[in-house]
Amino acid sequence: MARAGIKRGPVPVTAVEVEEGVKVSLCVDCARHPSLTRLIEAKSVAGTCAFCCREDAPVRDPEDAEPMIMLIRALIRFYWAEYDYNSHWGGGPVLDLFEDKANPVVEPPVANTYLDEFDEMLQWPPYPERDEGVAIYAGFDADGVRLINFAISRTEPRGIRVLRQRLLIEDFDDVAPALEALIDPFLGDIEFVLPAGGLWHRARIGIEAEYKRIQGWESDLLRKPLTGIAIGAPPAAVAGVGRLNRAGVPVLYLASKPYTALAEIRPHPGHHVSIGGFETLTDVRMADFDPDIALFSANDSRLDLFEIIQSLDRLMSAPVTPDDKAGYLLTQLLAEVLVRRGIDGVRYRSSVSDGINICIFDPARAAFVDGHSEVRYVESVSYEAPLAPSLTMPGPDDYLLEH
């Protein structure tokens, strides 16, 4: 959306010269986000880092700073809402975001020697054309109303919200064309081939049997895990509803780590959980719904696509409550649309572990393998729920934010 009253144009992001003629940039060592690290390493030279102030640091080439600046802007848009960094919405300066020791983008600056120069690089141009750069400020609409950007990591795009609501009252076949149109612009960007032979893990509550081992005066209770077809994908006749499958449609959900597989089935304290290993038998054409943000950080149009991808990823990875029918319906339809496009499965984040999950639409593409089975006993489950600022009745200074 164009910002009314703001002249937008292709003003290039270039290095800013400080008084001594030094051109500043950002070094590999000060980059925290892996995408940012990779981008700097791809074209680094010895130079001056604005954050650690070293003069011989491996920095992104100051003569080609625009991709780095646009990626940093995209990361700001991903992690923070505009009210965190726009004074008109009660926020502080943008660079104050990086003073936080827990920020996921860059190391906090050790001095402010070059921060003014880096801030100018980060802020200019403030409103590039949508297909020429990323804007961190939303600006105004045609009527002069101030707009606001919400954090991409916590925002549901309107297109996703509309489809979720339609699926509550319409059939899959009626909604499928709209979902296909939504994913078409980025499907080619997120396709990849998962090679045959990879080891993955699957968990299921329960065990096959218990044994009492008696040795002299000592005894142990041993449990045999579920193996083979008992821990594999259920047959069609008993396949239940899942995030990416309707009832009666068997698929194979796997995880990159045993603990991730266990956590994804959300067992209760007192449960014994069987874990088994699975190996992909063929190359699997996958869609990755947690791609590198750098692939979409060139401009606002691309970042809008990343927002849709991230929203779908959250729907697949976040716990879905029994009363949230729309959450299941949209991801189930997504799987069916992907199958029509020749996609064999999806990769998505885990919301309960640092591992990743995959769903293979044809379970025959992977098989159980010996040597990786075990039983885990769930002693306890914990939740982190820090107190969040809240109100019971909005006052005259409280403004309703429309996501």
Image (tube, rainbow, N blue to C red):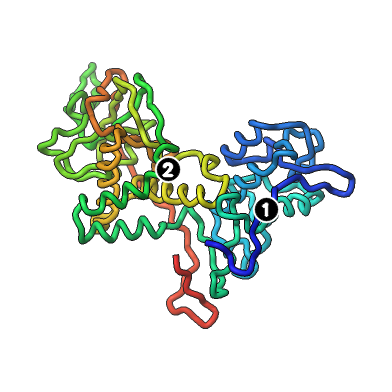
Q: Examine the image and state in which quarter residue 289 appears.
A: top left
Q: Is residue 148 left or right of residue 372?
A: right
**Marking on residue 237:** none
Is residue 387 visible to us here?
yes
Q: Residue at x 64, y 42 (%)?
A: 68
Depth check, mark 1 against mark 2: the one in front is: 2
Element under disc 2: helix
In what quadrant of the picture does the C terminus appear?
bottom left
Residue type, label 1: Glu
Q: Position of residue 321 (x, y in %)?
A: 28, 55
Is residue 270 visible to us here?
no
Q: Residue at x 60, y 61 (%)?
A: 137
Q: Position of residue 205 (x, y in %)?
A: 23, 37
Residue type, label 2: Phe
Please state which of residues 263 and 185 is positioned toward the viewer in this rendering: 185
Q: Which residue is mark 1?
A: 99
Element under disc 1: helix
Q: Is residue 256 left or right of residue 89?
A: left
Distance Cα–Cα, label 1 vs label 2: 34 Å
Numbered disc total:
2
Sequence-first tag of 1 and 2: 1
Q: Examine the image and state in which quarter residue 25 appears.
A: top right
Q: Which residue is mark 2?
A: 186
Q: Residue at x 28, y 50 (%)?
A: 177
CB contact under 8 Å: marks 1 and 2: no
